[in-house]
Each structure stands twice: as structure tokens, then as C-alpha cells.
Image (cartoon, rainbow, N blue to C red):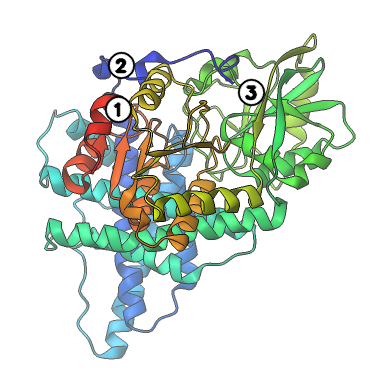
Amino acid sequence: MNKFFNYYNSLCVGANTPTIFSVDPYVTAIKELFVSELQQIVYYIEKLKDLAVDMSEYTDKVIEFISVLIVNLDFKKESFFIIIEDLYNNKKMLEKMYISACEKAGKTPQLLPEAKENLSSKEIILKALNDSERSIQGKISKIHVSKERKILYDIMINLVLNSCNCLIELKDYDVDFEGAKNQVLKLLNTTNFPSLTDEELILVIKNFSLCNYKIMKILYESIIKKFGPVKKTKVSIIMKKGKAILVSGHSIQDLEKVLLSVKGLNINVYTHHEMINAFQYEKFSKYSNLIGHYQKSNNNFPIDFASFPGPIYISKNSAPKIDVIRGQIYTASKYPAYGIAKIENGDFSPLIKYALDSKGFEEDIEINEIQIGYNEQEIYEKVQLITEKFKNKEINNILIIGLIDKFNFSDKYINDFLKFAPVNDFIISFSYYKERDNFWRVNSYYDFGVVYKVIELLSENAPDICEKISIFLPDCNSDTISHIFNLIHLKINNIFLGHCCPNIINPAIVEGLKDLFNIKPLSTANEDIKNLK
């Protein structure tokens, strides 16, 4: 695989110059404004639910609003005004509903403090946004909560975002996880109560990890039910002469929609980034337009998008790591970022027209072939072997390396890791291969679901085995924080986290994971192995 993924954004790979990255204060200000309004909306929803008012309709609305925060927030101003005005109007309506419900119940309403600015006009919204942006830049004073409290709130919001994204995707599989929706809103509402101690917030986060894990597990099972079963599959890294569409993101439902729209047309479809997982599901083998995978870099999307000679479709609610290339990117997200064209009502004709008008690939080029997926029976048999060795004290620790090994940093790290790891420690790798005793590789690439499957099976076969499992995560993405707390829920106490690009995870959150939740930063392989419990 390294033969193709050979372009690196070295600034995101263990670089010594993290200050090169900066968070756009405008985007951060938009996010803070959204979150503030959502917090207030959730407060009134929870209060109305306490008064036995059916809030299911509004819960769904909030889940959709929260998902907006997943995508690139470089909105057109018109879209931004629509979202904020919609949020504000919903908040004021819920506030009135709450006051009315309290009157009927003979109770005194507990209203939130009135905001300084009434977001009822474009001028006031822009002023609020500008003030927020200036405060982020430190140009005006702002009341701050403690550093630890801010980190805990950011972690909670990250978990809420991930859960909402999964819940919206589940809806596409006709799964309505009502209980989880309520727990997600309760978690966001917790940020409205500053009287809670940091220790109480840590407990709230850990308790929520069970809900988050269930959401992700049900989504994983729903994908397999519709598109599976999973099988070992060879994926071509190839460029075939002809018109082309690139599909990036995580929702393979959207990939299928694109494939159905080009059926019978002379347009080749390529997957990008984590969309490669689609090849491991049996159903996608029937689509003749699905040619292979196109990707030159794991962490530098502009290289891939700029070099692709056709339109790019980003599945809805995905968060591409790009500075938008205007004019050739499409999405079905409700509020696309500035410069990204919106696919309306499942009509892919603009995407198809762009593909037909583009030059496409001018010749056939075969780069490589990689294998992804796994055999279910092999998983069970291998786990059985590992647990027998553990019970017989033939192995001391189980070291899990996941997921991707295409970075210069992790390439060296994993080679050193395999060199220094004791021979009586069993290594499970979710991509990297090495000839050595007590070693097993599963080709999961971007599929974290199989990691959970392996850990669950190990735990079922030997309940005390999780205390001896350590997991090493060389790569960071938008789901990493959720994965960390899912692993904590699975009783994995030894978690090592690699360098996180600051534009993916805020360095303050990474520091907080270390200080508040004992998530260890990767250092050198030798040192990390010495630090195993």
C-alpha cells in the first residue's frame, strides 16, 4: 500500500512545528455560536420532557442541527444566517412552550439568563459573530472557565457530534435509536450546569461512553446487514481511461446512490479515503462502474482532489480535511460549505454532467493491489488460539496496533515496536505485516468495527484479559476521541495516542486526554513498551 500512499503532509506527521497550524477564529466563532444556541435549545427540551411533553420531533431537529457542526463550517453567509435564525427561532419557541407548560402545571419556570444579544436580525448576528471572533483572538476580554473544564466541555461536545452523526446515518438504515437520542441531548445539556465538579463531569463522560459504543456498534451491524457480509477482497489502486467520479467520506449509502445514478453510463467510480471499506462488503461487487480506489496521500486531501480529473462527491456529514477546491466538489449535506455544490433531492445529474464534461483519465495506469476485509471464521479461530495461549500463560500481554501504518512516523515506530516487543507478548496489527512469532494481522484499514469485534471476543473467551491489552493508535481522525472512550468502556486501560494534527484534534484536548484520562502519548517504541503496565 505504501507504493501508492507516498505523499505525506509532514506537518501532521510528528512534526516539530505545530505552531504552523492555527484554528481559524471565524470558523471557531461560528461553532461557538451554534453550540451556545444548541445548549439553550436542549435545556428547554429537557425541561419540557420533565413536564411530560412529547419532544421527539424537536429531538430529531436538534440531532440534525448538531450534525451541521461535523462539516466544514466555511458557510456562505446566507446559509449561516438561515441556520442561526432557525436555531434562535426554535429556542424562543421552546422557551414559550416551557413557560406555558409551567403555567399549566402550576410551577415556576426556571429560565436561562437572557442572552446579551437577541439574534433576531442579520446585523445582530454578525455583531455577535465578530465579538466572538475577536474574543478568540484575544482582542477583547472574555470570561473563561478553567482549562480543565473547557477541555471536558470540548470532549463532551466532540462525543455529542460523533453520536449525532452516527444517529443520522442510522436513520438511513431505518434504525431510530430513541433512547440514545435522549442520552445525547442529556450529555449536551450537562454543559448548562457549571456547578458540577470536574470529577462529576469525568464520570458523566465515562458513563456516556456505553451509549456512544452502542450507537457505533448498531451502525456497524446495520451496514453489514444491508451490504455484507464482510469478505476478504482485493482492491485495485488503478486509473482507467475514461470519465470519472471520486467518492470520499464515510457513508457507503451515498456511494451506492452515486453508483445507481451512473448505472448504464460510461463513467467510472473510484473510492477515496475511508470509503475504501465499501469493497469489503459483498453487495458492492455487483456494481460494474465501481473500478477501484484513488488516493495519493492519507492526510493531504488537496493533493488527491486537485489531481483527480473529474468531480468529487463527499458523502453527507463527512468532514473532509481540505481547503475547498471550488467548483468540482458536491455533497448532499443540508448546509454545504462555501464553494461546494449541493445535490438536491437525490438528483445527481449535475455531478454526472460535470463528470461527462471533464477530461477524465487519458490512459490506463495500474498502481497496486491491496487486500482489505477479513474472514469471520478466521477471526473466531485466531481469537480462540490467543485466549488459549493467554490462559496457559504462554503470552503475557496483548498489544494492538491500529489502524493505519502509512505515515513516515508510524512506519518507523511500528518497525521499532516489533523489534523491541518481548517475544512472549502477542501483537495484533490492523494493517501492518511482519514475520514474527505471536503476530496476527487483520486488514481493517479504516474499519474500527473489527477492532471492537476482536476485543469483545477476547473478553468473552477470557474475562480478565482486557487488563493485559494495550492499544497503540498512531493516527488521529475526527472519530479518535469517540474510539478512545469506547476502548475505555471495553476496560482497556493502556491506550497510547500518536501525534494529532492540530486541525483535526485541538492540542488542548490531547493534553486533557493525557492529564484527565491517562491516555499516554506515543514517544519511542522502546520507551512505550517499558511503560506497559
* Type of amino acid under label 2: Ala
* Type of amino acid under label 1: Val
Task: Please state the total of marks drawn on the protein image.
Answer: 3
Quarter-wise, where is residue 147 in the image? top left
Q: Residue at x 51, y 26 (%)?
A: 434
Residue 73 image offset from top left, x and y in percent:
42, 36
Q: Circle 2 sits in a helix, a strand or a loop, which is it?
A: loop
The residue labelled by disc 1 is 23
* Type of amino acid under label 3: Gln
Q: Which mark is residue 15?
A: 2
Separation of residues labelled 1 and 2 (CA atoms): 17 Å
- Of residues 387 and 499, the one nearer the viewer is 387
Query: Badge 3, how many Cα within 10 Å: few under 14, some, many 20+?
Result: many
Say which quadrant the N terminus sits in: top right
Q: Is residue 369 left or right of residue 163?
A: right
Q: Circle 1 sits in a helix, a strand or a loop, which is it?
A: loop
Q: Is residue 3 left or right of residue 196?
A: right
Q: Earlier in the sequence, mark 1 or mark 2?
A: 2
Query: Badge 1, how many Cα within 10 Å: few under 14, some, many 20+?
Result: few
Q: Residue at x 26, y 15 (%)?
A: 16
- Of residues 344 and 410, the one nearer the viewer is 410
Query: Badge 2, how many Cα within 10 Å: few under 14, some, many 20+?
Result: some
Q: Circle 3 sits in a helix, a strand or a loop, which is it?
A: loop
Separation of residues labelled 1 and 3 (CA atoms): 25 Å
- Of residues 67 and 439, the one nearer the viewer is 439
Residue 32 image offset from top left, x and y in percent:
29, 43
Separation of residues labelled 3 and 2 (CA atoms): 31 Å
Q: Is residue 403 left or right of residue 397?
A: right
Say which quadrant the C terminus sits in: top left
The residue labelled by disc 3 is 328
Residue 466 image offset from top left, x and y in percent:
35, 54
